[in-house]
Image (spheres, grey):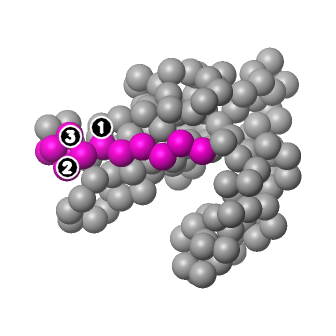
Amino acid sequence: MPPATLPDFAFETAAMTRGLTVVVGVDEVGRGPLAGPVTAAAVRLHGEIPGGLADSKALTAARREALYDAIMGCAEVCVAHASVQEIDTLNILRASHLAMERAVAGLSTRPDHALVDGNMIPRSLCCGAEEIGR
């Protein structure tokens, strides 16, 4: 695995130069397991990026746990889910997008733009979006 790229505000800055002011990131977890719901989080960081933050797959469980308070102290966060029944009805991709849509819509500040970690934009986001991952 290549070394993790340190996060920065490059995507947010680019969006803001286009006149967008409330920019959030959104990602899912749980598309691979054999059972259980799929979960997504939408996050809007305020101020500085917490030191040591990187892709969760590049961090140990202990480091992820240690970063939790730092992230919650400088971010607006919404976590949302799509149920097993929704996965069975819709399919895992659409259910993961539904969880992303719910997470973005659940933020207390309505975003202008979402940065989606993936190669497809969920079709019913409450704001504009762009793919930034994979």
Which residue: 78% across, 61% down? Answer: 50
Residue topped by disc 3: 86
Q: Nearer the viewer, mark 3 or mark 1?
A: 3
In this rendering, the answer to whether 7 lies above or below 83 is below
Real-space Cα separation, disc 1 to disc 2, in angstroms: 12 Å
Pick the residue in front: 125 or 64. 64
Which residue: 28% across, 53% down? Answer: 37
Real-space Cα separation, disc 3 to disc 1, in angstroms: 9 Å
Left/right placement of residue 121 relative to residue 132 reads left
Q: Quadrant of residue 21?
A: top right
Residue topped by disc 2: 84
Q: Nearer the viewer, mark 1 or mark 2?
A: 2
In this rendering, the answer to whether 47 lies above or below 130 is below
Q: Are marks 1 and 2 in contact (CB under 8 Å)?
A: no
Neighbor class of circle 3 (other Cα within 10 Å; few <14, some 14-19, many 20+) is some
x, y (%) of residue 123?
Answer: 40, 25
**Dot 2: element:** helix
Q: Quadrant of residue 4?
A: bottom right
Q: Which residues are magenta?
A: 77-88
x, y (%) of residue 76?
Answer: 66, 42
Q: Quadrant of residue 12?
A: top right
Left/right placement of residue 117 relative to residue 39 reads right
Residue topped by disc 1: 94
Which residue: 73% across, 62% down? Answer: 70
Q: Which kind of residue does numbered mark 3 sit on?
A: Glu
x, y (%) of residue 49?
Answer: 80, 55
